[in-house]
Every structure is written in C-alpha cells, then in structure tokens.
Amino acid sequence: MYFFPPTLQDLKEEIDIRLSRVQDIKYEPRLLAEDDSRLLQLETQGCYNYLYRMKALDAIRTSEIPFHTEGRYPKSLIGKNFCAYLLELRNSSTSFKGIRKALIDTLLDGYESARYGTGVFGKPEYLKYQDALNELANMTKARGGSSQRQHQSAAKDLTLSPEVSNPATIQVTYLPSNQKSKRAKHFLELKSFKDNYNTLESTL
C-alpha cells in the first residue's frame, strides 16, 4: 500500500477549511499556563516571537481592565470583546473620554500584530503592549473608583433628611379676666353718666 503525500492544493483546501471554522469558536482558552515549560525558553537566546504573541493575548485575561463587566462583553471571546471595548472606549463621550486615543491605538495595533500579524513581535513589542495595558488598567480603575465615590456621596445626600424650618409663630395676647371686667365696668359707668346728662338737659 502506497502513501501519497498531500499536494499543495490539498493543503490549501485544508487550511481554508480550518480558517473558516474560526468564526465558530466560542471560547478562547489560556494559551500559556504560569508553569508552562516553554516560558523557560525566553531566558535563552533565540527567536521566540510565538511565545511573546501568546503572552500578549493571555495578558488581556489577567489585566484588570473591566471590559467584561455587566455582561456586555463576556469572557468567552476575550480578544474580540476586548477590541470592541477599546473601540467603544475611544468613541465614548462618558467620563473615559479623557483617555488618550494614542493609548487605545497602541493596544489595538498590538493586539492585531500579536494575533494576526506576520511581522516581528518580540520582547520589545510585547513590553510596549504590556505597558499600555497596565496604563489603561490603572486609568479605568482610578476613574471607576472616583465614579463610585460620587455615587455614594449622592446617595448619602439623598438619605439625609432636610432640616424642617419652624413655621412663623403668630403670637396672640389675651387680656387677663380682671382687666376685661374693668373695661366693661368703665363702659357701663360712661353710658350711665351719658344717660343722666341727657335726662338733666331735657328738664331745663
């Protein structure tokens, strides 16, 4: 029985078939474990671009960038959701608008180069990409903490009951009963005097 090696056309078709399945991938596993023996190669002389590419993709998973919060960008598709998050962040008009566009472009370009690029992606490229990741993580963390403090302060203000101002007090002065009786007595005396005066005048 003879075995015929695959032709270039067969290899091309197999590659196209496997590439077409990329769209169906629903999970992106971690590429390098912390105790992966291949990491020891980075301490020796040689070209290990593929290891730095893998480290760059794994760095997204271990970063503290909250691109998967609130369920908008689930963790199953790390790279795709991370890029979508960066694009939204760059075009956002929220409190993250102050993040430098160049920083986001560095991360987008670094991810594209690490995953799809055909050029060199060695230690310098990886370190530049990792520094940009750390910077963005620190900025989002700081802004997130500031936003949380503002929400807490606003909630505290709402829970505080406002001081109830005392209504204007209308003071009513009542005369003592003895003064009332004196005024009534004087009125009767004056009336009696007037009547007597009128009677006396009519007799004259």
Image (tube, rainbow, N blue to C red):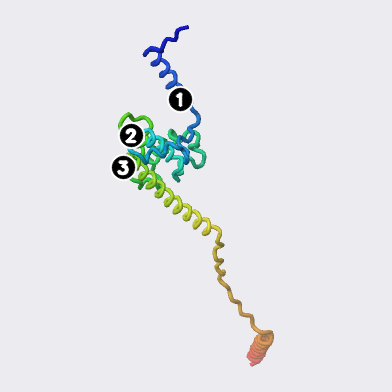
x, y percent for residue 91: 37, 39
x, y percent for residue 1: 48, 6
**Which residue: 55% across, 68% down?**
165
Whether tag 1 and tag 2 are in contact, CB under 8 A, the answer is no
Is the residue marked by circle 3 packed among few (<14), some (14-19), or many (20+) residues within 10 Å? few
Query: Which residue bears the numbered disc 3?
Result: 102
**Which residue: 46% across, 22% down?**
21
Amino acid of disc 1: Gln
Mark in the foreground, 1 or 2: 2
Is the residue marked by circle 2 packed among few (<14), some (14-19), or many (20+) residues within 10 Å? some
Dot 2 lies on which element?
loop
Q: CA distance from mark 3 to mark 1?
A: 29 Å
For the residue pair 190 and 180, the one nearer the viewer reads as 180
Amino acid of disc 2: Cys
Query: Which residue bears the numbered disc 1?
Result: 23
Q: CA distance from mark 1 to mark 2?
A: 30 Å
Q: How many marks?
A: 3
For the residue pair 74 and 30, the one nearer the viewer reads as 30
Amino acid of disc 3: Ala
Q: Residue furthest front?
A: 1
- Above or below residue 12? Residue 97 is below
Q: Is residue 107 visible?
A: yes
For the residue pair 149 and 77, the one nearer the viewer reads as 77
Q: Earlier in the sequence, mark 1 or mark 2?
A: 1
